[in-house]
Amino acid sequence: MAISRKPSRKKPLRRPRRASAAENGHRSARLFARAQKILVGGVNSPVRAFRAVGGAPLVIDRARGSRLWDVDGREYIDYVCSWGALILGHADPKVVSAVANQARRGTSYGMTSPLEIDLGERIACAIPSIERIRFVSSGTEAAMSAIRAARGFTGRDFILKFEGGYHGHADSFLVEAGSGLATLGISASPGVPAALAQLTLNAPYNDVAAVEKIFARHAGKIAAVIVEPVAANMGVVPPAPGFLDSLRRITSRDGALLIFDEVITGFRLAYGGAQGIFSVRPDLTVLGKIIGGGLPVAAYGGRREIMESIAPLGPVYQAGTLSGNPLAMRAGLTTLPRLEAPRFYDALGAKSLRLSEGLRKALRDTGIPGEVNATGSLLTLFFSSGPVRDFAGAKKADTARFAAFFREMLRRGIFLPPSQFEALFISAAHTEDDIDRTVSAARQSLEYIAPKE
Ligand code: HOZ
């Protein structure tokens, strides 16, 4: 690791030695100061600004495998992995070479290419609920379009989402949302017309009785329920047994659609996504991240008759200049077959288990209250004293302690998502040694932040 300020294993760090210029991050600091004069808040997505954790935001120079290097040459084991997009790790040589080869053949056609058909067929084969698909460029665009299709198809206006769920930043979703909004404490975004926000209903995640009540109050008026089948934008919160089945039953009974937002879980928990694992078939699915192999792509798809309400077959309008972009399609087509390798997901799961067990033990040994929620290669350490089953539970976590932990981990060369309300992502490029170093850094960090008598 390039960070040489290694704390002693025996006693908690009290007074670190004076750092070198590079360790102080002079170049990063200079660049971030410049960034703040041109990019809003110095960033192009709020959580990158480290507002919830403090300290200087990272300015990245390059990445490979499980590692990131900042512009001061400091090396980090990366558990953000471009927010889950990089299941094979950074700069996977096959993906890089496929994208480079494609670039020589053209970077955007603005017309259909065989690559879109190939990737569409591959996704539909992996996720049978997807009978028709439309590629777009971001998860926000995909979720927004899926909701529009649901409203257009059903002729209804209300949608139901879950507190702490995050489906991108389209107007209809910015009510009681997770991810960056939870991180910054924004419960409703100015700029969203009240008339539209009133059409977004919210229920606590995992609360079937609350969903039943809302459906009783708005019978025949809800176009769709949109849900992350494993919540990962309030930190990781798995569905309670039967929760997803109940959503399927309630929506079918009422004539509403069920939309799974699998932007994070799709191709991450299993090749067939969360819906394969939980055996619940949604009407529509939203995908992103992994399907583009680290390039900007997302998609929505599902039942044929619903998707056929979209232009040019139907009147629900949605379009995009870069949709089905050939570079992104190539990256996706190079990534997905690799995930079909025998035991690919078992290997990811084993690393995740090693990390979560290591973290739990470190919490126990240091006496710091905490809960590790994990599903497959998604994981969150909540600094809370009870189980976290919904957004209310997630918000009880000690975010100040998380911030201190984050900073100590960063100082030890481990880059965690800079928010209590996000998931850690483990990639195929993470090694057991990476995991062991992470656990040992976590133990040292917890010892360091533990309240002293
Ligand atoms: N919110 C997404 C992760 N949960 C994408 C990252 C971002 O907001 O920048």
Image (cartoon, helix red, strand yellow):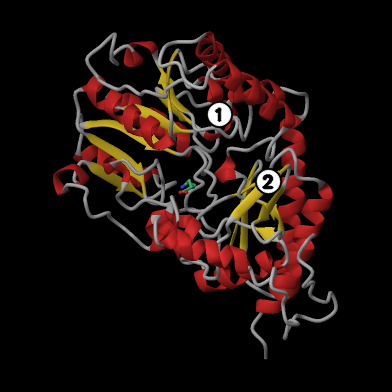
Residue 226 is left or right of residue 15, and the answer is: left
Along the line of sight, the residue nearer the viewer: 419 or 164: 419
Residue 93 coordinates in the image, percent (x, y): 74, 31
Residue at (53, 15) in percent of width and height: 124
Identify the amino acid type marked 1.
Gly
Instruction: Specify few, some or many for label 1: CA neighbours under 10 Å numbering under 14, 14-19, or 20 or more.
Output: many
All told, the count of numbered labels is 2
Where is mark 2, residue-wise?
63
Residue 266 coordinates in the image, percent (x, y): 55, 31
Along the line of sight, the residue nearer the viewer: 142 or 281: 142
Residue at (69, 70) in percent of width and height: 23
Where is mark 1, residue-wise?
292
Residue 114 is left or right of residue 248, and the answer is: right
Between circles 1 and 2, the one closer to the viewer is 2
Q: Is residue 227 visible?
A: yes
Residue at (75, 68) in percent of width and height: 443
Residue 246 coordinates in the image, percent (x, y): 42, 34
Give the position of the C terminus as an image quadrant: bottom right
Along the line of sight, the residue nearer the viewer: 166 or 51: 51
What secondary structure is marked by label 2? strand
Marks 1 and 2 close (CB-CB < 8 Å): no
Identify the amino acid type marked 2.
Ala
Q: Quadrant of residue 250?
A: top left
Residue 11 is left or right of residue 267, and the answer is: right
- Counting residues from the start of the chain, the first of labels 1 and 2 encountered is 2
In the rendered image of this protein, does residue 240 appear above or below residue 263?
below
What secondary structure is marked by label 1? helix
Furthest residue toward bottom:
453
Q: Quadrant of residue 161?
A: top left
Residue 118 coordinates in the image, percent (x, y): 56, 11
Give the position of the N terminus as an image quadrant: bottom right
In the rendered image of this protein, does residue 134 appear above or below residue 409?
above
